Amino acid sequence: AHAPDTTGLVIGGKPGAAGPPSPFEFWYLAGPYAEAGEPEKAYVIAAEGLQHYPDNPSLHYNLACYAALAGRREDALRHIKVAFEGRPEAREWAKKDPDLDSIRADVQDDLA
């Protein structure tokens, strides 16, 4: 909480310790930058989540989207493969996700 006189409540955390944030919080923070046409900045923000959740498939899916939009083809392919391995339903998402248009042909076999 950044506002004065604001209290944060953490449920399920260790007493006296904070974080790390949940995996989804990294791509939620990054999303507005991608929507504003700054996918590189979105990628950098979301990639911080890999320090805490290196194998989280949903985080990798979102990183693939940001990387593809930023023209980071190799990064996008690396992330989407992790997403596919960890969340098979990500293949269905990727079939229609316009963020992945630039790499869809590269993963066509994985989408079948």
Image (spheres, helix red, strand yellow):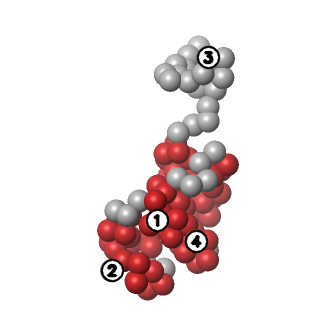
Earlier residue among tags 3 and 1: 3
Q: Which residue is mark 2?
A: 112
Q: Residues within 10 Å of mark 1 (few under 14, many from 20)?
A: few
The residue located at (61%, 16%) in the rendering is 15
Q: Position of residue 33 (x, y in %)?
A: 54, 55
Q: Which residue is mark 4?
A: 78
Q: With 112 as the anchor, is 57 left or right in this view?
A: right
Q: Residue furthest front?
A: 85
- The kind of residue tagged 1 is Glu
Q: Nearer the viewer, mark 4 or mark 1?
A: 1
Cα distance in 3D space between marks 4 and 1 = 11 Å
Residue 36 appears in the picture as rendered: no
Cα distance in 3D space between marks 4 and 3 = 37 Å
Instruction: Using the image, determine if residue 61 lies above or below residue 28.
Output: below
Q: Which residue is mark 3?
A: 15
Residue 25 appears in the picture as rendered: yes
> Are circles 2 and 1 on residues that touch, CB within 8 Å?
no
> Are circles 3 and 1 on residues that touch, CB within 8 Å?
no
Secondary-structure class at tag 4: helix
Q: Position of residue 112 (x, y in %)?
A: 33, 80
